[in-house]
Amino acid sequence: RSFSSRFTLSSSTMPICIVVEAEIKEDRMDEFLDMIEKNAIGSRAEPGCIRFDVLQAEDAPNKFFFYEVYENAEAIAHHKEQPHYLAWGAFKESGGTLSSVSKKASGKFMT
């Protein structure tokens, strides 16, 4: 796509994006994959969730990236109350991750 086919969003309509980088303990991969699939499916059904992608790194099979896009802060707050999101928190608290870093960003040039 050419740059001209994209659009710039005004600050009042910019979606909020969350990018998570997580490294999963190898012996917890099956549990993680089951949980994150349910999280992605549940998240995509939420009002205000525009996108929820789960990506696996090619160079490290236990490293994943989540790319989440929400309409606004209220949609993120709703997401954080859902059982599928809480399951991710429980997985981390139980020691299933080696690391997990989340970054929040505003949509700027999006298609």
Image: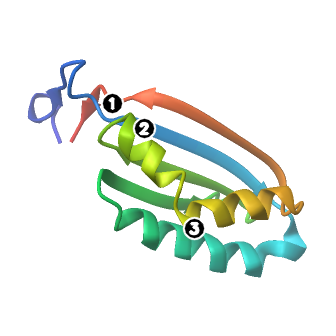
Q: Residues within 10 Å of mark 1 (few under 14, many from 20)?
A: many
| Residue at left offset 21%, top offset 42% | 111
Residue mark closest to the camera, 3 vs 2: 3
Is 22 placed above or below 42 here?
Answer: above
**Distance in Å between CA atoms under marks 1 and 2:** 6 Å
Amino acid type, mark 1? Gly
Q: Position of residue 59 (x, y in %)?
A: 71, 57
Judge left or right: residue 57 versus residue 52. right
Q: Nearer the viewer, residue 5 or 44?
A: 44
Q: Which mark is residue 81?
A: none
**Distance in Å between CA atoms under marks 3 and 1:** 26 Å
Tag 1 and tag 2, C-beta contact below 8 Å: yes
The count of marks equals 3
Amino acid type, mark 2? Cys
- Residue beneath disc 2: 17
Q: Position of residue 24 (x, y in %)?
A: 79, 61
Judge left or right: residue 72 versus residue 79. left
Label 3 element class: helix
On the rendered image, what quadrant is the N terminus found in?
top left
Mark 3 or mark 1: whose residue is earlier in sequence: 3
Q: Nearer the viewer, residue 33 or 58?
A: 33
Judge left or right: residue 9 versus residue 92. left
- Residue beneath disc 3: 83
Label 1 element class: loop
Amino acid type, mark 3? Pro
Label 2 element class: strand
Mark 1 or mark 2: whose residue is earlier in sequence: 2
Q: Residues within 10 Å of mark 2 (few under 14, many from 20)?
A: many
Q: Position of residue 67 (x, y in %)?
A: 48, 49
| Residue at left offset 77%, top offset 64% | 91
Q: Which mark is residue 107?
A: 1
